[in-house]
Amino acid sequence: MLLCALVIFSVLAGDSLGDLITSRDSEKQAQDGNSVTLSCNYTGAVYNLLWYRQYQTSKPELLLSMTESGEPVKEDPSAHWLSAKADKLTKLMELEISPAKVSDSAQYYCALRPTVTRNPFPLHKIFLHITRASHSLMSNKHM
């Protein structure tokens, strides 16, 4: 019974009582080939800032982690299309995908601790949908 109460308290309070992560967007759209930036605001004491991606039929995968004042550490160093930054004063963390591809359409998670699977720490999810750019008929004509 005590363990159950501790788990419930941990879920409601996060790791520390002030930790909270939010975003203005729960869904974002962009066109194939353009840049897209996902952002989250956070509060509380921060040790790590993390970005995860989850495709519909797979488990979440860690894309990168960083501290408020440090450079991001990518799980895949060759992922040159991903960049991230954090602003310690405004408590804003951003993930930029450039250029975005249709295959980048997925659920993205911003988190303050290693989380997503089994850990009850605060996180926020944003669904990103990348659409193919439509080509006008005029661009296909030779003049």
Image (cartoon, rainbow, N blue to C red):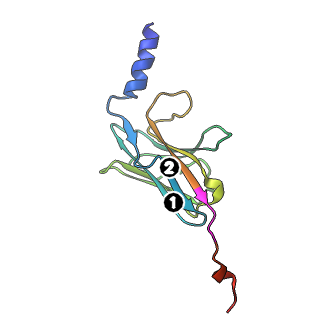
Q: Main secondary structure of the magenta part?
A: loop
Toward the front, the furthest residue is: 137
Q: Is residue 103 magenta?
A: no
Q: Residue at x 41, y 22 (%)?
A: 10
Percent across and percent down for residue 36 are 51, 60
Toward the top, the furthest residue is: 1
- The 10 Å Cα crowd at callout 1, few under 14, some 14 to 19, many 20 or more, is some
In the image, residue 120 above or below residue 131: above
95 vs 77, nearest the viewer:
95
Q: Residue at x 47, y 27 (%)?
A: 120
Q: Which quarter of the picture shows residue 48?
A: top left
129 vs 22, nearest the viewer:
129
Q: Which quarter of the picture shows residue 78?
A: bottom right
Q: Which mark is residue 27?
A: 2
Percent across and percent down for residue 102 are 64, 58
Residue type, numbered disc 2: Glu
**Residue carrying label 1:** 36
Q: Secondary structure at mark 1?
A: strand
Q: Secondary structure at mark 2?
A: strand
Please provide the residue range marked out in magenta: 130-134
Q: Is residue 69 visible?
A: no
- The 10 Å Cα crowd at callout 2, few under 14, some 14 to 19, many 20 or more, is some
Give the left or right position of residue 102, taking residue 109 as reference: right
Q: Earlier in the sequence, mark 2 or mark 1?
A: 2
